[in-house]
Amino acid sequence: MLLFMDKKDLAMDTRKAIFDFQYSEKMKSGLIIGTNLLEQLVALKGEGELSGGRKVLTWYLEGLLRELRIAQNVIGMDHYVNLERKMMEIVGRVQMSQFQEALRSFSEAISLATTSCQTSMSFLMEKKLL
């Protein structure tokens, strides 16, 4: 397929790979932070603290979702759709205090972000850009 692409098309693939790598890493680190926040949330005592903690974690995740949507607009790739769904699932589970399920969903979301990152990293390494 690359045999028929001109330099402009190749540059666009490289550009997308760089952005994909950058945003995937950002999502992965953001999800790891979210996992740590969830662990802190579970340790809270009292309904007032728990309610406030759920709100803060939800706000954090919604901010991360906005970043993911920006990445989708910048890159124009659909492979973030599954990650977006998984993150929305996490938000719902946190709001319903399903913390074990939310933790499992965090793991799945981190895996999705890692897979995306690995694909772009391989491409960039092949081009000797990483």
Image: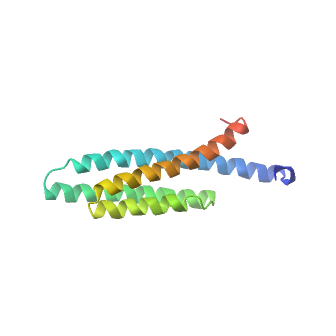
| Picture coordinates of residue 20, whole percent (x, y) | 60, 50
Task: Name the residue rendered at 63%, 46% in the picture.
Answer: 119
Identify the colour scheme used: rainbow
Q: Residue at the right extreme?
A: 4
Task: Answer with the quarter of the image where residue 122 lies.
Answer: top right
Q: Quadrant of the C terminus?
A: top right
| Picture coordinates of residue 126, whole percent (x, y) | 72, 38
Task: Name the residue rendered at 34%, 56% in the picture.
Answer: 102
Depicted 111 relative to depicted 58: above or below: above
Query: Which residue is nearer to you in this view: 129 or 40?
Result: 40
Depicted 55 relative to depicted 118: above or below: below
Q: In screen coordinates, is 98 left or right of 110? A: left
Task: Name the residue rendered at 41%, 57% in the picture.
Answer: 63
Task: Name the residue rendered at 40%, 45% in the picture.
Answer: 32
Q: How many marks?
A: 0
Depicted 69 relative to depicted 108: above or below: below
